[in-house]
């Protein structure tokens, strides 16, 4: 095992001056169907090891697979959402290789007859540039079991004392989505890679076919990278005519940030080798999240012959056109298009919308607006305290709010209390704290804490008079037209009223009395 | 209703079923009689790899109780059966004739076994077979060969020689088999018993340890056509656990066997099956059977299936290819044999897999795994596996063309009578030729049956006639089989197995 001696790398800008990068991304997605791909075992994550197994997914002698129709439907929906053609007739194939976490020592997959093929996904970069990722295929397969290597330094099989295998994951439905070679991205290749995986994740989430949790492995990315000599602008015919270089495949890059970093690293590493007159070895690479480098895995050679042949234990999958059209009717709005529509409905700036998206609060705001709040207020409240606290807890806002029982209806109610004049901003913040502390609905919290703007104008007027009298020099400035000085008096009036006054009304009264 | 013979093991399954239904005999009595017979003769024949005395008696007792309680039971309830060791049996060892699975106790029943249990057939034990069903003689069983009750120095056929010899030696009235290239029909032919390979998908494959998934088909074995039909009806039918299972009712096989009518039927004699390489005595009995069918009112014509010539070659590419993948699961990681490599400290998983597969598989299994691995390798796939699939399509087309003209096809089941143990062990090609007439049906997925046609003049050993029908028309096998059987038994003056030498008495054993 190579002990992670760092390879030579070339400065990224220098690499980009000399080479043109080409990528290919393979994304594996675990479907969150109730049962596994070929048997009735639950497909749930996180159960006791080897508790969700049966003769089929353990590959016991004599057991036979039966295709999970729901998984096929999910595969077709994914294909349609990626603008793919859906096969009228396709088969599963056996991919033969020996490995302890493969119960049958072959993986039931699809080979040259994928369920979906020839699609594309338009990906929007940070600055609004749209890059079209061509999709080669999306095919169905089963996941393998999970090996846990005990006692080795690296957690890999070499050097381990012993290994444990959990077959709960064996047979979970997987969809592998493979891009065509991604050319023309030039120096933005790493950014494009990240944006693609991010867009794909959003799409799959919107389809509700997978948990798409990269950290739990329900979405995994392998990044292929190759370089070719620079021959002009990345999208120029001269550049596109240059043959592709030898690629490496970096396996299991399991966060959006890592996708970007791994592609960038491989570009720099390839560039250093090629620039030094060397050649790239076609191989798989391991990504090291901690050090940000890749190390050599196994060499792809003739020895790696999977001896694919059509799976004789399964009948072909032949979705009727009626089924395909019915499934097309279930597709959600494309996440990117939906965002554009919501941004325009809500009147957010690009920057505001990006903040909302990055906070993962699009759905929350949509529901809050639907519950009656203004788009501005919904954004203000969700991106405030709840978002700050969710970040501190390293949770996403949706999960965090759900955990505390904070709902879009609560936020809309809170906004209503402000709009109706019962609460001012600082009171509303206190009410939200109360809701987050589990004290009840906003109205209940306001009632319990006795928070209510004083509506009695007499008391306010008396306080204003008292403050004017106590601050004759400030009052004089205001009389002279320096209206900004009113702020100092407003603050004192609010103090006099113990915060339970409408600051706007106080300002009106002060100005009326001094002008 | 005919009276049962004093020795219950000489009775047919249908006679036993009638007597059980009438209450003149109990399942425990019938089962015990067979267990006694096994104790007396299996030392000579070696049909069983495992006898489940307690399990069989317990099941028999349960059926008897259910019958006493007035429950309505299936036609074969209480009739004991032997199960080929390729079918998983919960709690009962299943080895497939291989060291690889020595000691393995499956945690589940094959669907066929579930159906047998539900129908109330006590399971006497598991029958011997060539390792993972690869062979035509049971000589490739890791536990030693079974012997042909007609001559203990000869093979009982294979891979289902355990099941065929069980029937011919009266150690069970019924048995299950699996047929990938002839493993039900050829053993039936050389032991003068009956066996059917149903239409592919007609009987569930769930729980059958796979040899070649696209060719394997489980089926019934018996001593008479009616017995075989009764068992076919129990074993067959749709199984949601097997994607390739046909979603339709079992064809009316029992009705066809009872009607035994071939009047007006068009029967095609396959020109390509029966010429050179066929033993004269086998050929003579076949010709007589065809003439008899004509006398019974069938119309006989000769039919050519020109692509059958390539069937054996295609079969020996498709079967090893699928087998090489199906047998990959035997890797010592989860169940079965585990062998540590010699002289290796701290061996890797890969080394343990290699050592186990080296020690656990016999030479024929290794031969086919290597063949299949080669045939599927990139660069060879199109030439071998791909071409074989094209031949397969041509053979199916030959059948289609033939069935456009005739209702069933007939041929000798196997080219020769039973050969001597050891005769063909060193010559795989000679062994493979045993299945030359049976393989086309597996490649095309059509049903086939073998019934006894008589004894060959030159050696006095049984020969078989094969009947083939279009897919899902399994009942035609039984119409023809039962009609011919009745005519032949009439001519012989009794069941042909009555002429087999008695066992349990060394002097009576031919050749001893
Ligand atoms: Zn399972």
Image (cartoon, coloured by chain):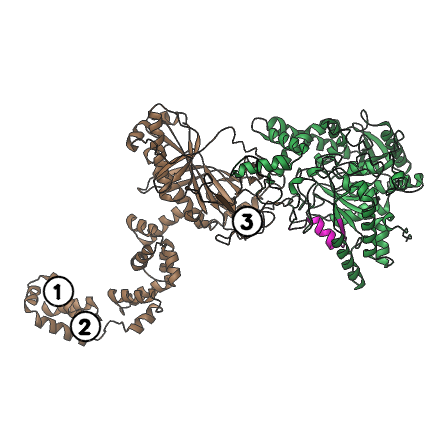
Chain colours: A brown, B green
The answer for how far apart the CA atoms under marks 2 and 3 are is 65 Å
Q: Does the residue labelled 3 lie within 8 Å of ligand 1?
A: yes
Q: Which of A61 and B111 is in front in this view?
A: A61
Point out the tag, 1 or 3, that comes first from the N-terminus. Answer: 3
Answer yes or no: is residue B463 visible.
Answer: yes
The answer for how far apart the CA atoms under marks 1 and 3 are is 68 Å
Q: Position of residue A40 (x, y in %)?
A: 58, 51
Looking at the rendering, in which quadrant would you find the C terminus of chain B? top right
Point out the stretch of residues depicted in magenta: B107-124
Whether residue A19 sits left or right of residue B26 in the image: it is left
Whether callout 1 and callout 3 share a subunit is answered yes
Label 3 Cα crowd, 10 Å radius (few <14 / some 14-19 / many 20+): many
Kindly check if marks 2 and 3 are in contact, taking CB atoms under 8 A apart as contact.
no
Residue annotated with mark 2: A497
Residue annotated with mark 3: A36
Instruction: Tell me what residue is drawn at x 57 percent, y 48 percent.
Output: A69
Q: What element carries label 2?
A: loop
Q: Is label 1 or label 3 in front?
A: 3
Say above or below: A260 vs B269: below
Say above or below: B443 vs B163: above
Instruction: Tell me what residue is drawn at x 46 percent, y 51 percent.
Output: A208
Residue B429 in which image quadrant? top right
Q: Nearer the viewer, residue A38 or A149?
A: A149
Residue annotated with mark 1: A488
């Amino acid at each position: 095992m190579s002990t992670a001696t760092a390879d030579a790398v070339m400065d990224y800008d220098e690499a980009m001056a000399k080479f043109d990068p080409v990528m290919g991304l393979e994304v594996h997605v675990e479907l969150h169907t109730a049962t596994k791909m070929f048997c009735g075992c639950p497909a749930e994550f996180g159960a006791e090891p080897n508790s969700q197994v049966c003769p089929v997914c353990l590959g016991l002698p004599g057991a036979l697979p039966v295709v999970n129709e729901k998984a096929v439907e999910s595969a077709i929906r994914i294909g349609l959402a990626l603008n793919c053609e859906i096969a009228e007739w396709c088969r599963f194939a056996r991919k033969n290789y020996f490995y302890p976490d493969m119960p049958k020592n072959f993986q039931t997959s699809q080979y040259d007859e994928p369920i979906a093929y020839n699609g594309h996904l338009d990906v929007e970069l940070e600055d609004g540039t749209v890059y079209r990722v061509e999709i080669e295929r999306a095919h169905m397969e089963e996941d393998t079991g999970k090996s846990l290597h005990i006692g080795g330094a690296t957690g890999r099989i070499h050097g381990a004392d012993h290994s444990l295998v959990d077959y709960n994951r064996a047979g979970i439905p997987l969809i592998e989505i493979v891009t065509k070679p991604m050319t023309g991205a030039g120096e933005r290749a790493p950014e494009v890679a990240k944006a693609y995986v991010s867009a794909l994740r959003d799409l799959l989430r919107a389809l509700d076919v997978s948990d798409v949790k990269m950290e739990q492995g329900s979405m995994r990315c392998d990044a292929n990278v190759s370089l070719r000599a620079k021959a002009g602008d990345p999208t120029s015919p001269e550049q596109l005519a240059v043959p592709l270089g030898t690629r490496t495949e970096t396996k299991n890059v399991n966060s959006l940030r890592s996708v970007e970093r791994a592609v960038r690293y491989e570009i720099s590493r390839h560039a250093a080798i090629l620039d030094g007159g060397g050649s790239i070895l076609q191989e798989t690479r391991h990504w090291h999240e901690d050090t940000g480098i890749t190390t050599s895995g196994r060499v792809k050679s003739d020895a790696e012959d999977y001896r694919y042949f059509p799976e004789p234990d399964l009948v072909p999958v032949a979705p009727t056109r009626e089924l395909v059209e019915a499934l097309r009717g279930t597709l959600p709005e494309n996440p990117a298009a939906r965002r554009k529509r919501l941004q325009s409905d809500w009147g957010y700036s690009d920057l505001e919308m990006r903040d909302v998206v990055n906070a993962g609060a699009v759905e929350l705001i949509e529901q809050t607006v639907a519950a009656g709040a203004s788009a501005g207020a919904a954004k203000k409240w969700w991106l405030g305290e709840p978002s700050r606290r969710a970040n501190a807890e390293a949770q996403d806002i949706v999960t965090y709010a759900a955990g505390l029982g904070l709902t879009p209806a609560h936020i809309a109610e809170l906004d209503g209390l402000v709009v109706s004049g019962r609460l001012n901003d600082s009171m509303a913040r206190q009410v939200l704290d109360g809701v987050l502390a589990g004290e009840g609905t906003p109205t209940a919290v306001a009632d319990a804490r006795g928070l209510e703007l004083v509506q009695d104008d007499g008391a306010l007027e008396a306080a204003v008079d008292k403050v004017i009298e106590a601050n004759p020099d400030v009052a004089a400035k205001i009389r002279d037209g320096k209206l900004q000085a009113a702020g100092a008096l407003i603050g004192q009036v609010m103090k006099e009223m113990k915060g339970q006054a409408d600051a706007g009304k106080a300002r009106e009264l002060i100005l009326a009395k001094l002008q | 209703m005919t009276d049962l013979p004093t020795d219950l093991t000489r009775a047919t399954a249908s006679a036993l079923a009638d007597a059980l239904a009438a209450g003149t005999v109990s399942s425990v009595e019938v089962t015990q009689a067979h267990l006694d017979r096994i104790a007396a003769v299996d030392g000579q024949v070696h049909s069983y790899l495992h006898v489940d005395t307690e399990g069989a008696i317990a099941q028999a007792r349960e059926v008897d109780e259910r019958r006493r309680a007035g429950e309505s039971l299936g036609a074969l309830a209480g009739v004991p059966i032997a199960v080929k060791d390729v079918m998983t049996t919960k709690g009962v060892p299943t080895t497939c004739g291989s060291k690889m699975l020595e000691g393995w106790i499956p945690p589940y029943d094959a669907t066929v076994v579930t159906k047998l249990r539900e129908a109330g057939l006590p399971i006497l034990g598991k029958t011997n077979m060539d390792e993972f069903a690869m062979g035509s003689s049971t000589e490739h069983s890791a536990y030693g060969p079974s012997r042909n009750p007609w001559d203990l120095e000869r093979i009982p056929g294979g891979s289902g020689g355990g099941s065929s010899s069980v029937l011919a030696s009266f150690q069970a009235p019924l048995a299950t088999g699996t047929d990938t290239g002839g493993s039900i029909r050829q053993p039936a032919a050389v032991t003068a018993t009956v066996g059917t390979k149903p239409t592919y998908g007609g009987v569930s494959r769930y729980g059958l340890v796979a040899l070649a998934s696209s060719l394997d088909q489980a089926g019934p074995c018996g001593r008479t056509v009616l017995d075989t039909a009764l068992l076919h009806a129990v074993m067959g039918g749709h199984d949601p656990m097997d994607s390739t299972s046909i979603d339709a009712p079992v064809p009316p096989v029992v009705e066809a066997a009872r009607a035994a009518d071939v009047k007006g039927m068009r029967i095609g004699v396959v020109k390509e099956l029966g010429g050179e390489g066929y033993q004269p005595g086998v050929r003579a009995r076949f010709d007589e059977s065809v003439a008899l069918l004509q006398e019974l009112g069938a119309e006989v014509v000769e039919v050519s299936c020109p692509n059958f010539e390539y069937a054996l070659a295609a079969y020996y590419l498709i079967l090893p290819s699928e087998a090489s993948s199906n047998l990959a699961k035997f890797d010592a990681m989860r169940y079965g044999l585990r062998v540590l490599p010699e002289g290796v400290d701290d061996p890797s998983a890969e080394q343990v897999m290699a050592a186990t597969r080296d020690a656990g598989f016999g030479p024929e299994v290794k031969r086919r795994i290597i063949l299949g691995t080669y045939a599927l390798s990139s660069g060879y796939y199109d030439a071998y596996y791909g071409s074989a699939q094209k031949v397969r399509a041509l053979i199916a087309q030959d059948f289609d063309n033939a069935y456009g003209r005739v209702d069933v096809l007939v041929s000798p089941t196997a080219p020769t009578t039973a050969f001597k143990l050891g005769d063909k062990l060193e010559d795989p090609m000679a062994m493979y030729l045993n299945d030359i007439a049976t393989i086309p049906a597996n490649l095309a997925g059509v049903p086939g049956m073998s019934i006894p046609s008589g004894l060959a003049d030159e050696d006095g050993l049984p020969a078989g006639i094969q009947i083939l029908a279009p897919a899902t028309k399994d009942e035609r096998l039984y119409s023809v089989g039962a009609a011919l059987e009745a005519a032949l038994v009439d001519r012989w003056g009794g069941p042909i197995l009555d002429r087999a030498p008695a066992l349990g008495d060394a002097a009576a054993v031919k050749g001893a």
